[in-house]
Image (cartoon, grey):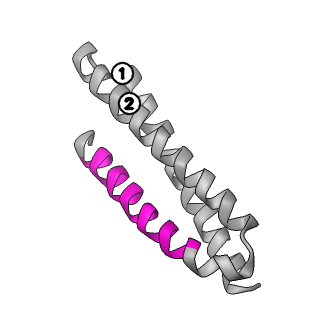
């Protein structure tokens, strides 16, 4: 498996973990009080949007030429770090 394929597989695995975290927050939201639900809902919408953006960027990376791969990877890494930070913040907020 090439480094590129390994990188894409790892990114897909992280997206799966984020999907599981979104589902967990969704379940917590269902049992929360009305005011807390609003906070959960807002956070979930933001997390879903960021996850969707990461998925789109990953799809672009899969289709990128070898020449474009390094440039795209650098941009993806920066975006990935921002999304990971948002997920960490959300999880900490609702524990």
Q: Secondary structure at mark 1?
A: helix
Q: Secondary structure at mark 2?
A: helix
Relative to 31, say whether 52 is above or below. below
Q: Give the camera-side residue of 26 and 52.
A: 52
Q: Which residue, given by chain and number where applicable, does mark 1 sit on?
A: 31
Crowding around mark 2 (Cα neighbors within 10 Å: few <14, some 14 to 19, many 20+) is some
Q: Give the camera-side residue of 54 and 9.
A: 54
Q: Give the camera-side residue of 92 and 47.
A: 47
- Is 73 covered by the magenta stretch? yes
Residue 5: % across, % down = 72, 77
Query: Who's the residue at 37% across and 51% down the image?
Result: 87
Work out which quarter of the rendered image holds the N terminus and state it: bottom right
Q: Which residues are magenta?
A: 72-92
Quarter of the figure with residue 39: top left
Residue 72: % across, % down = 57, 71
Q: Which residue, given by chain and number where applicable, does mark 2 sit on?
A: 28
Q: Residue furthest bottom?
A: 2
Q: Is residue 9 visible?
A: yes
Q: Give the camera-side residue of 12 and 69.
A: 69
Work out which quarter of the rendered image holds the C terminus and state it: top left
4 vs 70, left or right, is right
Query: Who's the residue at 67% across and 85% down the image?
Result: 3
Relative to 22, say whether 9 is above or below. below
Relative to 38, say whether 2 is above or below. below
Query: Who's the residue at 49% across and 69% down the image?
Result: 75
Quarter of the figure with residue 32: top left
Question: How far separated are the C-alphas under marks 2 and 1?
Answer: 5 Å
Query: Who's the residue at 60% across and 62% down the image?
Result: 13
């Amino acid at each position: 498996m090439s480094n590129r394929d390994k990188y894409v597989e790892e990114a897909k695995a992280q997206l799966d973990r984020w999907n599981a975290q979104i589902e967990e927050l969704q379940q917590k939201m269902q049992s929360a009080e009305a005011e807390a639900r609003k906070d959960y809902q807002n956070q979930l919408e933001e997390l879903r949007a960021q996850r969707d953006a990461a998925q789109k960027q990953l799809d672009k990376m899969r289709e990128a030429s070898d020449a474009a791969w390094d440039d795209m990877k650098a941009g993806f890494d920066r975006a990935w770090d921002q999304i990971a930070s948002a997920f960490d913040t959300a999880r900490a907020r609702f524990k």
